[in-house]
Image (cartoon, helix red, strand yellow):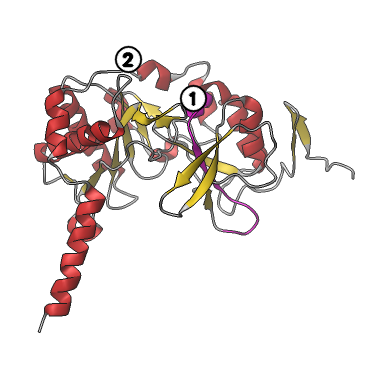
Amino acid sequence: MTAAPSDETREGVTLTHLDQPLFDGAGATKRDLVDYLDAMCNRILPELRDRPLSVIRVTGNQAPFMQKNVPKYTPDWVATLRLWAQTSQREVAYALCNDRRTLLWFANQRAIEYHPTLVRADRLGHATHLVLDLDPPSADDFAGAVVAAHLVHRALTDASLSGAVKTSGAKGVHVVVPIAPGVSNEDAAAATRAIARRAELLDPTIATTAFIKADREGKVFIDSTRSGGATVIAAYSPRARPGVPVSFPVAWDELDDVAPGDFTILTAPQLLGERDPWAAAMPPPQRLPGDLIAEGATIPVARVAAMHAGRRRARARRDAP
């Protein structure tokens, strides 16, 4: 079978249909995705290495879909980790994207988004970072997410902690706090809840920790549920959205002056040059204050609280005259 003119091989990976549009509205081709990920390889691989990986792919005319379990045709040189998935009651084989070859293989599969866990494969019970996800009520309220991010920054400073900030590549902002080895997923989750609550209390007219959308009253949601085996979009990862924006690191003092659309697979490499601002901005791993963990332990887990609230509301509707 003769290769198409747009096909080529890199690192032993055959790359096909490179000149096809990436997806409707992308304004970019599959080649643009491959070239971007290849150019960003040394920056994005440290975010993915040895972490169970979920990806969002766009193939053919299908809607974007999340892939956790690697397909049967996955090459045997792609490292994997088999884990039991409680929700689906089955074993899932997650990829570990540990090298350029694997990243290029994913790119050829039209894997656009890269969502690693907050734990490493050899320490599944211990989180490496806290993540606060600032989610504004609408796509045109990125400025609100920025204000909420500054509240989180203040809450972290008050707790003698520091973090780095990046656009999510969608409509919000992520604040990421590296933590010292040995912190259990439960303690990391508790500390995340405490920081979120403290940030909310700094200005409850702007921010909320209400998990149910109907309870947020148009405020920015500080999502404290990203912990342990949960995933977060990797720094520098593209997003399957019009224009193919990327999750991009921003200095705290420049956050007010950017917009998510400033950073795409077509513009980000030129903006960076040889720099890796995410690695440069990331503080050393920090010990979590005991009072922060203890405080968070008293705060209900958002999803659980929302589930109980939903049940109470359903009972009230049933019991209403």
The image quadrant of residue 151 is: top left
Residue that numbered label 2 is attached to: 284
Residue that numbered label 1 is attached to: 271
Name the residue type under label 1. Answer: Leu
Percent coordinates x, y for residue 40 in the rendering: 56, 26
Residue at (89% x, 43% y) in the render: 2
Give whichever of discs 2 and 1 has the lower sequence position: 1
User: Residue at the bottom extreme?
Assistant: 321
Q: Is residue 58 magenta?
A: yes
Q: Residue 91: which disc?
A: none
Name the residue type under label 2. Answer: Pro
Q: Nearer the viewer, mark 2 or mark 1?
A: 2
Residue at (21% x, 36% y) in the render: 190
Residue at (59% x, 59% y) in the render: 62
User: Mark 2 Cα within 10 Å, few/some/many (few <14, many 20+)?
Assistant: few
In the rendered view, does 317 fall on the left or right side of 273? left
In the rendered view, does 31 fall on the left or right side of 271? right
Viewer can see residue 158: yes
Residue span colored magenta: 45-62
User: Residue at the right extreme?
Assistant: 1
**Callout 2: SS:** loop
Q: Is residue 321 magenta?
A: no
Percent coordinates x, y for residue 142 in the rendering: 31, 43
Residue at (30% x, 19% y) in the render: 180
Quarter of the image that includes the C terminus? bottom left
**Callout 1: SS:** helix
Percent coordinates x, y for residue 230 in the rendering: 38, 40
User: Mark 1 Cα within 10 Å, few/some/many (few <14, many 20+)?
Assistant: few
| 193 and 94: which is toward the camera | 94
